[in-house]
Image (tube, rainbow, N blue to C red):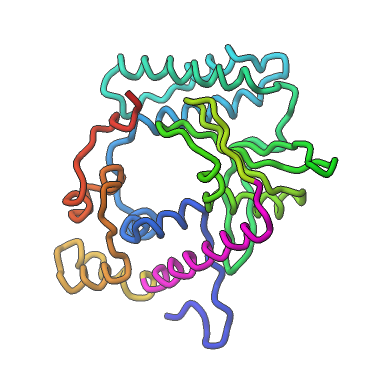
Amino acid sequence: MQDTLDGMPRRMWTGTPTKLDTWLSCPRRFRFTYLDRRPKGPPWAHSSVGSSVHNALRDWWSLPVDGRTPSAAADLVARGWLTDGFRDGAQSALWRDRAAAMTSAYAARLDPADEPVGVERTVAAATHGMALSGRVDRIDLRPSADGGTELVVVDYKTGRRALDDDDAKSSLALAVYVVAVRRTLRRRCRRVELHHLPSGTVAGHDHTEQSLERHLGRAGSIAEEASSAEQAWRSTLSARAEDAAAGDADAIEAIDAVFPAVPGSMCSWCDFRRHCPAGRAASPDLAPWDGLAE
């Protein structure tokens, strides 16, 4: 069955920056995530840290202005602490205290009265054959160089590696968010920032129309590939998934031709590692807490 009739426009691909990145990094992981859904492996402790901090900062902005204190930020981390993935209770408690401290230090640099335009705001845009959407950690309203105001996309980061301006400049997700913020909120937006809580640093970039167009063109190319693969899955390959799971070589070969694995060192961190012999062969096993900094 065809998705479109000959001569008719191709249906718009619907997705998120994460979905685009998943296709780009590993089509097999894309299949396991969005099409032939497989059970994930154990949760990661570093994901629990990140989610706990993000949730606390979201809730901090919901407090009355006079309640938005550094200690309140720490309390929110402790109250909403997620314990999945840690080696034991002692390690969880250690990281709860570390996360509370870095969130408190970050909150101390914020102006409680400087109300964001959006907190965990969902934004969307239709462009380049794609219907893209995503959730932005924070959208600020800042003075612009011409004396007016503009919106700024803020993304919180809690990983081990400190980030720089090149990370902000090269991020496809952040560029997509700029365009989606413009379309959703109808306001000027060009700046993106990565706020790295462990180091207290801010990496930023001011996009131009040309840099946004380059990112969107790249996103459109990725989406076109992903869309073709999804169509192949719907039309023929999904019917062969059961045979492939039973070990049928022809079915496996047909599916892998469209959704190949891209094995490498990052396979250690894949949630679908146990379903992928190629990924296991290319990388060592890791414990759920190995993503935490020393």
Q: Which residues are magenta?
A: 206-232
Answer with left or right where residue 89 lies relative to residue 72: left
**Residue 254 visible at all:** yes
Q: Position of residue 83 (x, y in %)?
A: 37, 24
In the image, what residue occupies the spot 48% across and 22% down?
Answer: 80
Q: Position of residue 111 (x, y in %)?
A: 70, 22
Viewer-closest of 86 and 99? 99
In the image, what residue occupies the spot 50% across and 20% down?
Answer: 102
Quarter of the figure with the C terminus: top left
Q: Position of residue 62 (x, y in %)?
A: 66, 25
Answer with left or right where residue 66 lies relative to residue 241: right
The picture quadrant where one finds residue 82 is top left
Quarter of the figure with the N terminus: bottom left
In this picture, is 2 found above or below 47? below
Is 107 part of what is drawn in magenta? no
Viewer-closest of 201 and 153? 201
